[in-house]
C-alpha cells in the first residue's frame, strides 16, 4: 500500500502556521492542488519518504506564496520595477537549452533566475535586501542532499546554487508547470493542466521577476533570459505576458532526447517511489514530449512564426558563442566585446568533459527507434531536415 499526502485544507493550515501569515492573495491555484492530490495518492506510488517529500513540497510552496503576498504589502514599490525579458529558451529537455540559457544569462547586462532563487523566490523574513545568504545556505543543503540521493544528477543536469536555472521550479510552486510531473509520476495531473488555463501563471511569474529584480539591486537595467521546456505547454502565456521576448527553440533529434529525458525521470521518480516502472515512464514521456512539440508547432503557426528563433543542437555544440551572438542580436541586444567575452568565459568554465557521461538507450525504456521516428515525424520533417532561418 502506497503512502498518502493529506488534503489541501490540512496543508494550507500547516503553511499558515509555519509562515505566521494567512493571506494567499488570489487562490486560483488551489484548484490545481485539488487536482494534484488524487494523482499523488494514486499514480505516483509514493513511498513513506516520498509522501513526506510531496507534502513538504506543497507546504513550502504555500509558505512562499504567503510570503510573496506579504512582501508586496510591505513594499508596494516592487510593482514599479520594469521587467524586460529579451529571450525565452523553450527547447525540449536534453536539447542543449540549459547550456544556451546559462551562457546567455552569464553575459554582462543579462540575467536569469538563479537556482537558489527558484527554490525560495521570496527573501526570508529578516533577510537584508541584496544579501541572500540565508537562502543560498538552505539551497546548498538541499542540493547536497539531491546529489547524494541521485548520484548521476550532475551528469544528467549539472546544477549550482548560483547558476541560472529554470523558472519552471517557481511556476511549479504555483502547481502550474511541468515541474510537478517531472518530480512525481502523475500523468493524469499533466492531462488536467493541458485542459485548464495555462496563461494565468505567467502574470504571477512576471510579478515574481519584479520581486527578484527588486531584491537584487545589481540587476538594475539587466535584461532577463528565461528558460524551461515547460514553456512549450504555455507559449500562449509567454507571448501574452512577455510580447517583447524572442522565443528561442533548441532542436535535437528526439531519438536522442527521449531516452535521455526518460533516464532523468526514472532517477527523479526514484526519490519519491520505490516502484518505478522504466517502460511506463518511457511510454508516458514519449507521448508527453510529442504533445509539447505539437503544442509548440500550433502556437508558432498561430502567430506566423513571429518572434521565434531556431537553434540546432549540433550548431550550438560546435559554435556556441556564434549562436549566442545571433540570438542576442535578434533579441535586440547590442553585442559588445564584453558580452561576447562573458559568453566565451562561461563556455570555457563549463566544459562537458568535466562531467561523467550520461548513459542511456531507447531499449532501456521499452522503446524503439522506429517508434520514436514515427511519433515525431511532422516535427522532424519541419525542423530537423531544414531549420528555418
Image (cartoon, rainbow, N blue to C red):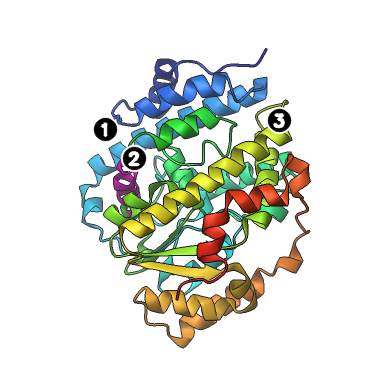
Residue at the (55%, 23%) spot, across then down: 40
Give the quarter of the image for residue 83. Answer: bottom left
Q: Of the residues under marks 2 and 1, which one precedes in the sequence?
A: 1
Looking at the image, is 151 positioned above or below residue 344? above
Residue that badge 1 annotates? 25
Looking at the image, is 194 positioned above or below residue 208? above
Q: Nearer the viewer, residue 141 or 36?
A: 36
Quadrant holding the N terminus: top right
Q: Of the residues under marks 3 and 2, which one precedes in the sequence?
A: 2
Contact between labelled residues 2 and 3, with CB atoms less than 8 Å apart = no
Badge 2 local density, few (<14 within 10 Å), some, or many (20+)?
many
Q: Of the residues under marks 1 and 3, which one precedes in the sequence?
A: 1
Can see residue 158? no
Residue that badge 2 annotates? 68
- Observer-side mark, 2 or 1, equals 1
Residue that badge 3 annotates? 276
Indicate which disc residue 82 carries: none
- Is 200 magenta? The answer is yes
Which type of secondary structure does the marked residue at label 3 adopt?
Answer: loop
Which type of secondary structure does the marked residue at label 2 adopt?
Answer: helix
Give the distance between the C-alpha atoms of the residues marked 1 and 3, in whole angstroms: 37 Å
Give the distance between the C-alpha atoms of the residues marked 2 and 1, in whole angstroms: 9 Å
Question: Which region of the structure is painted magenta?
Answer: 198-209
Q: Nearer the viewer, residue 162 or 255?
A: 255
Contact between labelled residues 1 and 2, with CB atoms less than 8 Å apart = yes
- Observer-side mark, 3 or 2, equals 3
Rendering coords of residue 175 (x, y %) = 43, 35
Residue at the (65%, 68%) spot, across then down: 350
Quadrant holding the C terminus: bottom left
Give the distance between the C-alpha atoms of the residues marked 3 and 2, in whole angstroms: 35 Å
Amino acid at each position: 500500500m502506497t503512502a498518502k499526502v493529506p488534503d489541501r485544507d490540512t496543508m494550507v493550515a500547516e503553511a499558515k502556521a509555519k509562515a505566521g501569515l494567512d493571506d494567499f492573495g488570489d487562490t486560483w491555484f488551489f484548484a490545481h492542488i485539488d487536482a494534484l492530490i488524487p494523482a499523488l495518492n494514486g499514480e505516483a506510488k509514493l513511498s513513506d519518504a516520498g509522501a513526506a517529500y510531496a507534502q513538504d513540497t506543497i507546504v513550502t510552496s504555500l509558505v512562499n506564496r504567503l510570503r510573496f503576498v506579504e512582501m508586496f504589502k510591505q513594499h508596494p514599490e516592487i510593482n514599479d520595477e520594469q521587467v524586460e525579458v529579451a529571450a525565452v529558451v523553450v527547447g525540449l529537455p536534453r536539447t542543449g537549452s540549459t547550456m544556451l540559457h546559462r551562457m546567455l544569462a552569464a553575459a554582462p547586462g543579462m540575467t536569469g533566475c538563479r537556482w537558489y532563487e527558484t527554490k525560495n523566490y521570496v527573501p526570508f523574513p529578516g533577510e537584508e535586501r541584496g544579501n541572500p545568504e540565508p537562502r543560498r545556505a538552505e539551497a546548498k543543503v538541499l542540493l547536497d542532499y539531491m546529489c547524494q540521493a541521485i548520484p548521476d544528477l550532475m551528469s544528467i543536469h549539472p546544477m549550482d546554487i548560483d547558476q541560472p536555472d529554470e523558472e519552471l521550479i517557481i511556476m511549479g510552486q504555483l502547481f502550474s508547470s511541468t515541474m510537478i510531473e517531472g518530480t512525481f509520476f502523475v500523468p493524469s495531473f499533466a492531462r488536467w493542466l493541458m485542459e485548464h488555463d495555462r496563461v494565468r501563471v505567467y502574470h504571477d511569474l512576471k510579478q515574481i521577476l519584479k520581486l527578484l529584480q527588486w531584491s537584487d539591486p545589481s540587476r538594475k537595467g539587466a535584461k532577463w533570459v528565461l528558460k524551461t521546456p515547460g514553456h512549450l505547454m504555455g507559449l500562449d502565456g509567454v507571448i501574452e505576458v512577455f510580447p517583447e521576448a524572442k522565443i528561442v527553440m533548441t532542436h535535437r533529434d528526439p531519438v536522442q532526447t527521449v531516452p535521455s529525458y526518460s533516464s532523468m525521470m526514472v532517477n527523479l521518480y526514484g526519490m519519491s517511489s520505490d516502484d518505478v516502472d522504466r517502460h511506463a515512464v518511457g511510454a508516458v514521456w514519449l507521448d508527453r514530449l510529442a504533445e509539447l512539440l505539437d503544442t509548440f508547432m500550433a502556437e508558432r503557426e498561430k502567430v506566423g512564426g513571429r518572434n521565434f528563433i531556431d537553434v540546432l543542437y549540433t550548431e550550438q555544440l560546435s559554435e556556441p558563442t556564434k549562436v549566442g551572438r545571433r540570438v542576442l542580436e535578434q533579441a535586440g541586444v547590442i553585442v559588445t566585446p564584453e558580452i561576447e567575452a562573458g559568453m566565451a568565459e562561461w563556455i570555457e568554465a563549463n566544459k562537458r568533459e568535466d562531467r561523467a557521461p550520461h548513459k542511456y538507450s531507447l531499449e532501456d525504456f521499452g522503446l524503439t527507434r522506429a517508434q520514436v521516428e514515427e511519433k515525431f515525424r511532422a516535427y522532424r520533417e519541419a525542423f530537423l531536415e531544414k531549420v528555418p532561418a
